Amino acid sequence: MSGLAPGRWMARLAVIALLLALVAVAIWQLNARPAAPPGPVEVLRLAVNADYVGSCPVLAAHGQGHFAREGIDARLQPYSSGKASMEAVLQGKADLGTVSDIPVVLASLRNQSVVIIASIFEAERDHGIVGRLDRGVSTPASLKGKRIGVTLGTSGQFTLDAFLNRQKLLPAEVTLRNYAPEQLAGALARGEIDAAAGWEPFLTGMTHAIAGKAAIFYGEDVYAGLFNVAGTGDYVRSHPATVRKVLRALIAGARFCQDEPDAARALFAKASASETARLQAAWHGYRFGVVLDQGLLLALEDEARWAIRNRLAERGTMPNFLDAVYLDGLEAVAPSAVTVIH
């Protein structure tokens, strides 16, 4: 190389430098690509109440790509209640579903094997009763003798019964009418019922359906809403690796809902302007997190006593609700999130 002219020598150095730079860029691009999910991609059918704020960890895990990063192709199926989601799971239409605690209790009392893999949300002020002022519903006590719409077999019914009990009213002192959650606002507006019990966002829809005539009573003193992810015992226990992947994705999703409230609220793009405003005001009271807490078992037992007392299931004995909670998955992924005594 000593025989090369200085100009040609510099040109060769420039070419070499360019080649090295291109190699460096290629290596950087290769490393910057998201890692391929471990193993084959697995399809998961997930029944979810996509309009309910408690589903935020699921929607975030899906929208932010956390399921995909775990090798899960999550197929979200929309339902208007946890009861409907649970029925889809029990009928084999979905693998897992989002559900409050009441449908799990009723399934257990019917000797159906349903297990909760985690609670993902808790709130105190998302259940309540909306009454028509022009039908004489102005105070909780004035519900006596009224026709009340409710979705039977849900947390809405449990909240209503507990609320009536607090007013020293017997179930026989009101007339219950069964509606799907999305039908309650219309029934209230048409005057088919005098009041309706349910949860958000349906409560907001009901108050707007009878604008100027609505009285609303929240049930935070009688029911703290828990929202869970559950499946059949057969599915959950035969898919331990899948459950761990789902839980890791849900943990990331719950963190997003807790730490990025503005972006998380955008997941509920179909919400009305009034519902969006309500979400913004109420968000600070929501607790997103993936846990299995001893309080869950206590709630399940309390609700089972209510169901047995009201003859909502054939079984008249208390189940062992440790059988309705799958601990192995979360203990493997986030052991500190499990406080169930076992």
Image: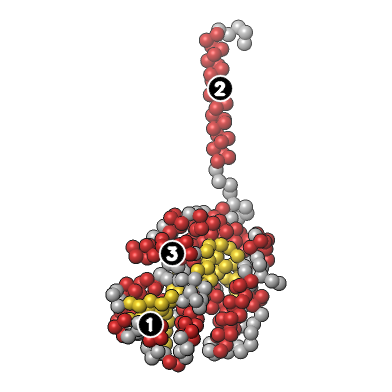
At label 3, counting other C-alpha atoms closer than 10 Å, the crowd grade (few under 14, some 14-19, many 20 or more) is: few
192 on left or right of 122: left
198 on left or right of 191: right
Query: Could you tell me which residue is drawn at 58 percent across and 77 percent down?
Result: 299
* Residue toward you, 37 or 204: 204
Q: Position of residue 225 (x, y in %)?
A: 51, 72
Circle nearer the viewer, 2 or 1: 1
Whether pointer 3 and pointer 1 mark residues with C-beta atoms closer than 8 Å, the reply is no
Q: How is the image coloured?
A: secondary structure
Alpha-carbon distance for marks 2 and 1? Answer: 81 Å
Query: Could you tell me which residue is drawn at 56 percent across and 36 percent down?
Result: 28
Residue under pointer 3: 282
Looking at the rendered structure, the kind of residue marked 1 is Thr
> Which callout, 2 or 3, points at the residue further toward the start of the chain?
2
Alpha-carbon distance for marks 2 and 3? Answer: 58 Å
Whether pointer 2 and pointer 3 mark residues with C-beta atoms closer than 8 Å, the reply is no
> Which callout, 2 or 1, points at the residue further toward the start of the chain?
2
**Disc sitting over residue 139 in the figure:** 1
Furthest residue in direction right, as rendered: 342
Furthest residue in direction bottom, as rendered: 172
At label 2, counting other C-alpha atoms closer than 10 Å, the crowd grade (few under 14, some 14-19, many 20 or more) is: few
Q: Quadrant of residue 237?
A: bottom right
> Is residue 124 visible to the viewer in this orientation of the structure?
yes
Residue under pointer 2: 17
> Is residue 95 visible to the viewer in this orientation of the structure?
no
Query: Could you tell me which residue is drawn at 57 percent across and 26 percent down?
Result: 20
* Residue toward you, 290 or 140: 140
Q: Position of residue 134 (x, y in %)?
A: 29, 83
Looking at the rendered structure, the kind of residue marked 3 is Ala
